[in-house]
Image: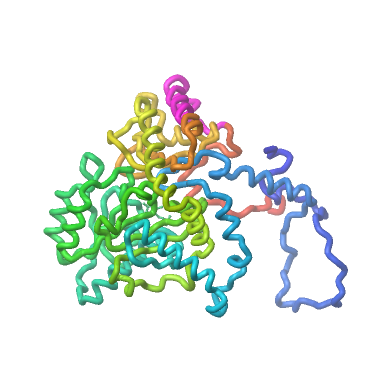
Amino acid sequence: MNNQLYGNLIFELSKAGRKGYSLPKNRFGNYQVPQELRRQQDAELPECDEMTVVRHYTNLSANNFGVDNGFYPLGSCTMKYNPKINEEMAALPQFQKLHPLQPAETTKGARALVALLERQLCTLTGLAHFTFKPYAGAHGELTGLMVIDNYHRSRGDLQRKKVIVPDSAHGTNPASAAVCGLEIIEVKSNDKGLVDVEDLRRLVAEEGPAIAAMMMTNPNTLGLFETSIPEITKLIHDCGGLMYYDGANLNPMLGACRPGDMGFDVMHINLHKTFSTPHGGGGPGSGPVGVREGLQQFFPVVSPYYGNFAVLIKACVYIMSLGRDQIKDVGPLATLNANYIKESLKDVYELPIEGLCKHEFVFDGLKDKSTGVTTMDVAKRLLDYGYHAPTIYFPLLFHESLMIEPTENESKDTIDGFIAVMRQIAEEAKNQPELVKSAPHNTPIGRVDDVLAAKHPVVTFRQMSKE
Ligand SMILES: *Cc1c(COP(=O)(O)O)cnc(C)c1O
């Protein structure tokens, strides 16, 4: 992209008097906007010719990184390929032109799709009912916790206000519990990265009658399968609590096992992760909540109508196009890809927890700590090579977390290319550490001050010439 020619902001390309439009002759006479509604001064809008506008925005769009133009191993996000047939189906006018207030008899097809998706999710999860109202994973967590709260209230069990959350959990878990008015108790991880059952036993002994639920992510955020689930669910159920399953990333479970069979009572699924809707930059999402039989009457109303309907269409099409047999390959392939990367890099990157992972895993930075090259540097250097960075500095269990999730979609060639680049960066860290520490070098914008960018984002343009 040629920034000199086309500029960074459309305002910088503006030349007084330039135009990229022509309006038809006014045939309706001269209606005057009432004086009190008029601007004091003309709006400061950019004035550009059509080609300048087209090139400016086309070039800007080429700066976007997406699954369609590169490998995107962002851990805990499941940035998987969105098959084009999903978009075609969601764009059918019969779906797209629906209005939520249409008479029910004219929306039978749409409602049949929701019912079909509910059956599909029940089959995949072993739960009995789903609500599709939540707009995201965190919204699903809140909805699911409200189900649990409503259940305890219905039994007059008003003192159950505490939720057990593992220390490795996604940050949305404690946040959702807090928004729901519940109190969070943290349970520790053991040295294998799994829930420490002894610590849990102690918490249950201390807090038993106050425990509303325990939230679990499985495989957990380290990509490890929680092996003590039967014991954990028994502990929680015996003290009167319910088990909540964070199924944001259901990828490794597809075709392998089901939360319902493992004793979970309530769960949410991120359709925008596991079932393929692209979801960078905050949307669009859908976080349906499933419950076992007998809890469906406690679903709260958290949004109007049917939730994010276009995402439901894409999830349903994704499931149907894989079909009953191929969907069983998703979990094993995602797991194979993650383990292949882990094993190919663990001699140069620090692997804090050995053994098989599921769909993702976490390195604790480079193995050789003497170079001073951090996880942040590695992530920035990856951009130079055309890869999206993995998730960094999450989970918080390690100082230099680098969390990699390849998904099931990628070919061996793509994965081998990524491994080669990760090794190359490890080599550079040894021989030319400054090159890595000052990366990225090939992107339109170099290294930004993350804190400043987050705390004081500049989202408006000031016209310097006029000040
Ligand atoms: C992504 C994720 C969430 C939150 O989902 P959003 O749609 O971003 O709200 C919750 N838990 C886990 C484990 C996740 O990976």
Q: Is residue 467 left or right of residue 358?
A: right
Magenta range is 419-441
Question: In front here: 208 or 23?
Answer: 208
Up the image or down, 221 lies above or below 265; here it is: above
How far across and down, in percent of the image, does residue 38 sit? 73, 73
Residue 72 showing in the rendered view = yes
Question: In front here: 133 or 14?
Answer: 133
Up the image or down, 85 lies above or below 148; here it is: above
User: Which secondary structure type mostly characterizes the magenta part of the structure?
Assistant: helix
**Residue 167 is covered by the magenta coloring:** no
Instruction: Name the quadrant where ligand 1 sits.
Output: bottom left
User: Residue 288's quadrant in the figure?
Assistant: bottom left
Residue at 25% over, 76% down: 154
User: Residue 30's quadrant in the figure?
Assistant: bottom right
How far across and down, in percent of the image, does residue 444 sit? 61, 38
Question: In front here: 236 or 160?
Answer: 236
Residue at 70% over, 43% down: 7
Query: Seen from this angle, which residue lies furthest top?
Result: 431
